[in-house]
Amino acid sequence: MSRRNSELAFLALAAVISTMAYVSVFAGRYHEIRRASIVYGLIFVAVFLVLHLVVRFVLPQADPCLLPITALLSAMGLTEIYRIRPALALLQGQWLLVGAGLFILTVLIVRDHQRLDRYRYVIGALGLGLLLVTMVVGTEVNGARLWLRFGGFSIQPSEFAKIAIVIFMAGYLNDKKELLSMPTKRFLGLGFPAPKYFGPLVLMWVLTLVMLVFVKDFGMSLLFFAVFLAMLYMATSRIAYVMTGAALFVVAGAAASQYVAHVHERFLIWVDPWSRAATSGYQLLQSLFTIADGGMLGAGLGRGYLLFPNHQPIVPDLPTDFIFAALANELGLLGAVALILCFLLFCWRGFRIAMWAPDGFSKLLAAGLSVTFGLQAFIIIAGVTRLIPLTGITLPFVSYGGSSIVANLVMVALLLMISHRAAVVRGGSLRERHELAKLG
């Protein structure tokens, strides 16, 4: 079976699961199966069928698993958002259409991801600019300044900035990896390269600290810095950079937890939510109770205890920050583990693409995007389950958030372009070796 036919078969499976999920939620809400539930499911399937056709004709050798995983995660997110707050599900569906359109434009206009390497400094500056604009004129929500508002809608620039910065890091580290791997200076017994090569990377560290202090966004700050360290290690194989960077971030985080009120409150909630059960610790405790109430198999989609009699969510931010708790309640431990495995499978395919990529820029870009996706999922799930302090970032493709779903669809488009080029180059080299073997 060809890659595209495999992708179509996986999409068919995702379509069946998503349609069944929609029908289940409608039946749970209205106590009957309505035609609208099947129509909504078919519209969702049609969106991803169009994306499949674009990939089939433009990127025929692309990875066959990423798009079906994206469809399945998006379907589960949309279904659960509708279960909690139908009006938000309609908005999320509109943003999904915008993201699908941007996915298509990315594939058709960029075509070859290596073109981005030529403009890495421009793209990196654009990413930094988005973050700086947010710091200056952004709107503060729940203590963190994350949003830019235009008329009747808002966007979260950091979701797009993360892609721009990964592209810049991939290009810069690919060019300077040899120089960064050869230490010429020593500090505290550790070797470091010349400052002129390390300067842009120090700037990234400063940026994360600025985000932590002024934007008050612990989650995105942690994500940016962890991705930065991961890509630096993948380019240089020097564990000293990771250890030094992690130590610096721990020091900065400890300082912020003492002197930045919003970050300090998040740490206090994480350490002892019980003493704040009626105030700031309420959401986290309700999240833990909601997950535990799901048991092993869950109550079933549309049948969990997620809403009060007045139809308000039992966790105020349930469609956004705590969507994982809602799914764990209705799908149980097995369903929650299956959801996590979908994220792990996505990351595994991304790293597989990086391994087969024919050049350094492609390898670092694919690995960087995969790390970004995986770490974002880990940070929010770990926060909801109280493994780390709670953060306000989204669960990719699942949480309600227009900026997130649009940016992540662009990320999938880039990974598919990298996998297509890797397969074409690898196929060409195999054919050349086969011809040489016949001649020999």
Image (tube, helix red, strand yellow):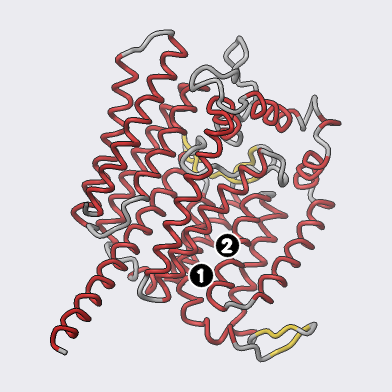
Q: Is residue 425 left or right of residue 437?
A: right
Query: Is label 1 in contact with label 2 (beta carbons under 8 Å)?
Result: yes
Which amino acid type is shown beneath numbered disc 1? Met
Q: Secondary structure at mark 1?
A: helix
Q: Which circle marks residue 169 in the picture?
A: 1
Residue at which label 2 appears: 227
Residue 19's quadrant in the figure? Answer: top left
Count neighbours of disc 2 (C-alpha within 10 A) and say few if under 14, some if 14 to 19, many if 20 or more.
many
Residue 225's quadrant in the figure? Answer: bottom right
Give how far apart the Cα atoms at labels 1 and 2 are.
10 Å
Above or below — where is 288 with respect to 104?
Answer: above
Instruction: Quarter of the image for the C terminus: give it.
Output: bottom left
The percent coordinates of residue 350 (x first, y second) are 43, 58
Q: Nearer the viewer, residue 87 or 277?
A: 277
Question: What residue do we see at 37% from left, 70% from top?
Answer: 357
Above or below — where is 31 with respect to 19?
Answer: above
Q: Secondary structure at mark 2?
A: helix
Above or below — where is 212 with respect to 428?
Answer: above
The percent coordinates of residue 193 (x first, y second) are 64, 86
The percent coordinates of residue 154 (x first, y second) are 50, 39
Question: What residue do we see at 60% from left, 56% from top?
Answer: 223
Count neighbours of disc 1 (C-alpha within 10 A) and say few if under 14, some if 14 to 19, many if 20 or more.
many
Residue 89's quadrant in the figure? Answer: top left
- Pointer 1 or 2: first along the chain: 1
